[in-house]
Structure formats: structure tokens, C-alpha cells
Image (spheres, rainbow, N blue to C red):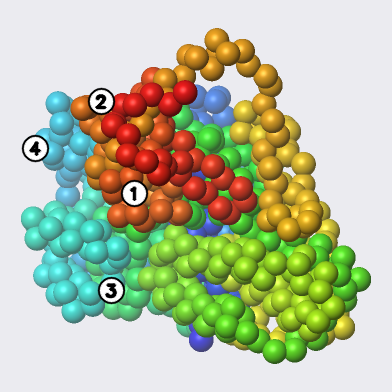
Amino acid sequence: MNYYITTPIFYPNSSPHIGTAYTTVAADVLARYHRMLGDQVYFLTGTDENAQKIVRTAEAHHLEPQTYVDGVVERFKELWKSLDISNNDFIRTTEERHGKVVQQIFAKLYEQGDIYKSEYSGWYCTPCETFWTESKLIDGKCPNPDCLRSVELLKEESYFFRLSKYQNALLQYIEEHPDFIQPLSRRNEMIRFIESGLEDLCVSRTTFKWGIKVPFDPKHVVYVWLDALINYISALGYPDGENYQKYWPANVQIMGKDIVRFHAIIWPIILMALDLPLPRLVYGHGWYLSKDGGKISKSRGNVQDSFELIKRYGSDAIRYFLLREMQVGTDGTYSEDNLVERINSDLANDFGNFVSRSLAMVVKYRGGVVPRPVQDGPLEMELKTLSSEVKKGVDESLGRCDLASALEQIWRFIARCNKYVDETAPWSLAKQEDQQERLDTVLYTFVESIRIMAILTAPFMPGITPRICSLLSSDEHLIRWEEADQWGIINSGASVQKGEQLFPRIDISQYAEEVAKPVESEPKQETKHVELEPMKEEISIEDFAKLDLRVGKVLSAEKVAKTDKLLKLEIEISGQVRTVVSGIAQHYAPEDLINKSVVVVANLKPAKLRGITSQGMILAASQGEVLEVLTLDKELPGGAQVK
């Protein structure tokens, strides 16, 4: 099967940022996944360089537009390389191969009457490259909520594309193809926009010269949206190119929600006018927001240095965080604290720790040689059943571009594997002569589980795959998607090694500058294998007395929306009800805590978590994957002091 996926082409008016990176990483996951399925994949990204704001930005830097964009485009290419982006092509709208196709299409649309010359008078926002009618302005400024900047009144001779002519045809197409625009919220938004009435589109400008000339009227340059959208077929060599014949229509065109309107309305109508097939799926994802709730964008000045983040934490960790935090139909929130928390919790504790300690036990108990499994028990059968469920869930999630859900499915398997270690207790089996065959089965299951993890995570974190293959002495090309739910692939007698931690823990106070010591490979005696937190410095009794620890009764509990770990608790203390947000949702169902008496730090300064003001903290003990909230066996009134 042929599979064509595109990102939007990005404005090279400044270096790319972490919000921009999400779109391209998401597209890369889908491209890699389909290559693993055996599809012939073509993955396109690029830059949109023919825009008025490029001219103005270049002038501000005292450079010619071409010189300026050449430098910025190299930064895009460097970032995609740093993030392990596997694009097949990188299109620039200043390239001759693109300009020729734009001129050809413009002339064709003009000759068939879909483009006509008139005069335009309206309000123009340069940063958004958009004309607005006066009725849509907000306080006389651009109505785009991410812009809200000044607009200028323009009056000039222009060519127009008959967008309104195809309004009913597009509306009918969307209704007949319910999966054409996703997610559902974007589809509904586009339907409402079309039903409100489409105006003909201005497709040329005369007030600046930077851009592709209208072939039969060179004082006009082709306006950005007609020019830019055509890149998706010009890159393929439209109309006669081999790649165009092979890959069009696109399977998925993915972009941020702010430009869905152009891709789900203007672009399909251009294709209808050319009598060409429409893309199968237009997918608009949310934005990445900063901690204060604002969109991460160059215009807001709150962007992160993507190169520094990758240098600090690694490409795989950045990719994982971006993909895991963006839920379907919603915005994601970026902060470096959240990033470090994800790395430590999901990647270091869950994934990396399982790989490290499992292989360390194979090395210790069997000299690094994979033993022959003897007989599966109920625990092994449960793992095998779960791997099939997870693979199916990942397939379904990626089929609808729900990358966060796919990762949640994978982490179900990883969490179960960690639990399997504690349930089987191989350190105990190793001490019993009559349990050596059972130990062989457990150790073999460890190695197979790691292989399956490597397959499932390969599209998301491609840098991990060769590292795991090296630990398993396996060829990277043997990581096949169809074997993600098959067992018995690793040959007994193969050699493995422990290697270094895949994801060392990060000291959240100093980020990547100091990392925690590697986890011990196994527990001593009969204790569970975990890394214990080091003792903190001594404090005086006066310091301890500053804490006001109180008994509180949990009245209600519910999961915090769009999070995996947070529960919102309503707790009664001395007749007052407090809201406490606690990161225990992966260990307790809400109903498990109702009517429980817990210990609360009652004089902790309130803090906002996911928009909820938390008025205290409940105490819990944790060791490895196990966490338990401290509760009281005897009935004490809410507000009783803990001493």
C-alpha cells in the first residue's frame, strides 16, 4: 500500500520552536509506523517562504528575503534531523519545481473562469496573511485570538478565486465523508463556517514583489494561500510525475487547529476546481500552551529553545513528552517541570528500569545467556493476552491519529511487565534448586517483553530501538510490527547484556546537569527491587513543628480531566471542606478513597494544578511502583492533629 503524509509548510520568519515540532514529530510517528507495516511511505514537510511578513522580517534584519530565509530554513532542517524526523522530501516554495506548478495551476483556473480580476478593499493582517471584513474585526484589530494585532486597510487590483462557487459541493462532500476532517470538533467547526457563507478568495497581490509571478500578468504575485497549498502536489511532480501518480491523494494531512480552515476548505475547493481527488484525512491538532495558558508561539515570545531541550534531555524524551501530553481535540500544556516529571516517571522508572533490572538478572543468574522457557503459567499467559490487546489498541489509535492514546496503551503493557517482576520474584526463585526451570521461564519472558516494548515504541522513540537491539544482540531490522504480539521470537542461547540505563533519572532541581545514580539491578534478600530515595538533611524539632498535620475525611474523589495521574479530592478538616489535588490516580480509583481518613499537610501554601487550587497535601509512602496513601485504622474526627 502507498501512504502519503504531509505536515503544513512552516513560515521561516524565525527559528522553529517546540510547538512547531509537535506537528512534525506526530507525522513522523505515523510515517514510521506505516513503514513498519510494509507500506510505501512518502513523508513531506517544508517551508512557506513567499509571504509579505518574510519580506518585512528580512528588512528588519537588513537582508534580502532569499538570504534571510536560506539561513532560517537550515535551522528547520537541523531541528528535524535532531528530532530524528524521517521525511522523504523537504519542499521550499521558492524552489523552481514549485513555482512552475503554481503558475500552471493559476493559468488553468483563470482559463476555466474560476479566477477573475477585480479590485480588493479590506483589512489585512500581515502576521496571519489574512484579509478580514470590517464586521469580523475585534476592536478594530485582527480577530485571530492568537494575534489581536493591528490590521491595515488595503485597496488594490487583485485576482480572485471563486470559492463561493464550490460551497455546496464541499459541504456535501464533508457530509458524505464523515472521516474527512478530524477530530470531530474541527469537522463541526468547518461545517458551521461553510454554512455561514464563503466569500471569493483574493489570490494575488501587487503591493510587494516577493513571490511567484502570475504568468500572464507579472505585476501580480500569487497570494500566499493559493501558492502555499499547492506544495502538496508540486512536491510530487504534478501533473505527470511518477510520485504524483503513485501517492496522490494524501492519506493524512496534519496541521495545527489554527490553519485547519485553509486545509479543509480552501485546499479541497482548489482540488475540486482542478477535478483532482481530495486528501483522505485532514487532521487538526491542538496547540501547545505555556503554564500560564497562552499558546507557545514566536509572536508571544514564550518559545523554548528546541535545540537546547534536545541537548539536555535527548530526542526520544522530547518526542515522548510532546506526543503523550497532546490529547485528541484538546490543547497540551508545556513546562519543563512536567517534561522532567514524565521522563523520571514514565521513561526512567517504568520503561528504563524494567529493561535494566530484567537484563541484569539474566546476566547474574544465567551468565547473560537467554534460557529456554519450560512452561507458561497464568502470569505468562496474561502477559501474552495483554500484548495482543495492546497491539490492537495501538493500531486502532494510530489509525485515527490519536498518538497519546497509543502511548497509553503501550504503557499498560510496560506497567504490567513491571508488576510481573514483583509477582515472580526471580531473586527468590534463584535460591531454590527446584525452581530453576521456573526461573528460566521468567527470565525468558523478561527478554521477550523487552523485544515487544522495542517494537511498540519504535515509531515514537526511534533512537531507543538500536540501543535495545544492541542489548539483546539482535539485528535492528528484525524489529517487525507484526511480531509485537508474538512470543518465542528470541532464540534461547542468545546473549544479552545489561548496558547503561536507557533513561537515567533527572534531578528536577537541576534538570539534566545532574542525574541520579542508576537503579540497582535487583533487591537484596527478599525486598522488592527499587531505588530508594536518599535521606534528606537533618532538621530540628522546631522545623518539624512548623508542619500542621491533620486528619481529614475524604468526602469525594474524581479524576482530573486530561491527566493520567491526578485525583481531585474533597476533604473535611475541622468542619471545613478543602480541595486537594494528588498525583495518585494510577494507584487508586476515586471510589477507593471515599470515607477514608487520611493525613493532610494542612498549612501548605495553596498551589494551582491544572487550573485547580489545591489546599494541602495528603501523605503517602512509595517504593518503586508501589504507592500507598497513609490512612488511619481507628476513627478520629476530621481535624485531629497528627503528632
Q: Earlier in the sequence, mark 2 or mark 4?
A: 4
User: Residue 104: which quarter of the image?
Assistant: bottom left
Give the answer, above or below, for where 485 lies relative to 101.
Answer: below
Q: Which residue is mark 1?
A: 593
Please indicate whether residue 113 sits to the left or right of residue 492 in the image. left
Residue neighbourhood size for the residue with mark 2, other residues' Cα within 10 Å, grouped as few (<14), some (14–19), many (≥20): some
Q: Which mark is residue 566?
A: none
Residue 50 left/right relative to 625: left
Amino acid carrying label 1: it is: Leu
Residue placed furthest toward the bottom: 375
Contact (Cβ within 8 Å) of mark 4 with mark 1: no
Label 3, secondary structure: give it: loop
Indicate whether 14 appears above or below 586.
above
Residue at 69% over, 30% down: 535
Callout 2 amino acid: Ser
Mark 1 surroundings: few (<14), some (14-19) or many (≥20) residues within 10 A = some
Q: Secondary structure at mark 4?
A: helix
Image location (x, y in percent) of residue 199 = 14, 54
Q: Residues within 10 Å of mark 4 (few under 14, many from 20)?
A: few
**Cα distance between the residues tagged 3 and 2:** 54 Å
**Which x, y percent locates residue 400?**
38, 71
- The residue under the point 34% across, 26% down is 640
Using the numbered discs, state the Cα–Cα distance from disc 4 to disc 1 in whole angstroms.
53 Å
Give the residue type that dot 4 points to: Ser
- Residue where numbered disc 4 is placed: 135
Residue picked out by circle 2: 574
